Image (tube, helix red, strand yellow):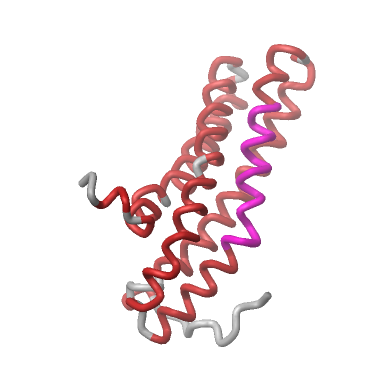
């Protein structure tokens, strides 16, 4: 196992569920926290959202390092999906960074500006919803690189720059 951890493509595949599943679980926790109006639950949800959104950075980093090693293994359609996956990731990674920053800000607000805590928690949940959708959009192209069974649509001809 430790040998595989030196391969960026392995680390990318190992870590890539964290931002998506983590944001989904954090969002679910935030909805429960908002419904119950429990401060502790909001803080827990914000912590899960922060860690999950921040985990997109190493996923992106290792994905970038893996491209040169994965491209030769992909067929022509897989290569197109790899380019599309890379393009989507480059454009949308900033949503994850914004979510991490907003979750951290909302957590600090719980302590230093309690009256703003609920509106910021709601804003964090809204951004988490959009970030979750973006994560699925990025991942759907990534899954089609080497998995033909997920290629139920034609590959993009030319990634949009």
Residue under the image location 57 percent in, 61 percent down? 89
The magenta-colored residue range is 89-105
The quarter of the picture where the C terminus appears is bottom right
Seen at 64% across and 31% down, the residue is 103
Is residue 94 covered in magenta? yes
Q: How many marks?
A: 0
The picture places residue 10, in percent across and down from the top left corner, at 32, 56
Q: Residue at x 54, y 63 (%)?
A: 137
Q: Nearer the viewer, residue 89 or 28?
A: 89
Residue beneath the point at 55% across and 35% down: 49
User: In the displayed image of the protein, which residue is found farthest to the left?
Assistant: 1
Image spot of residue 71 (x, y percent): 40, 75
Query: Would you say 93 lies left or right of 26 here?
Result: right
Q: Quadrant of residue 145?
A: bottom left
Query: Is 58 positioned to the left or the right of 134 in the image?
Result: left
Residue 35 vs residue 102: left or right?
Answer: left
Is residue 20 depicted above or below 54 in this figure?
below
> Which secondary structure dominates the residues rendered in magenta?
helix
Q: Position of residue 8 (x, y in %)?
A: 38, 56
Give the x, y percent position of residue 128. 61, 43
Is residue 100 shown in magenta?
A: yes
Residue 67, quarter of picture: bottom left
In the depicted structure, whether residue 71 falls above or below residue 119: below
């Amino acid at each position: 196992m430790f040998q595989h951890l030196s391969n960026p493509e392995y680390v990318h595949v190992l870590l890539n569920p964290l931002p998506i599943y983590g944001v989904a679980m954090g969002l679910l926790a935030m909805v429960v926290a908002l419904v119950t109006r429990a401060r502790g639950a909001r803080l827990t949800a914000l912590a899960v959202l922060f860690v999950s959104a921040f985990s997109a950075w190493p996923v992106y980093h290792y994905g970038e390092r893996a491209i040169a090693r994965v491209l030769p293994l992909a067929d022509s359609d897989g290569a197109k999906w790899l380019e599309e996956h890379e393009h989507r990731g480059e454009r949308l990674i900033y949503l994850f960074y914004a979510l991490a920053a907003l979750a951290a800000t909302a957590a600090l607000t719980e302590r230093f500006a309690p009256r703003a805590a609920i509106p910021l928690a709601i804003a964090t949940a809204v951004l988490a919803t959009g970030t979750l959708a973006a994560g699925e959009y990025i991942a759907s192209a990534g899954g089609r690189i080497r998995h033909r069974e997920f290629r139920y649509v034609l590959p993009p001809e030319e990634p949009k720059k």
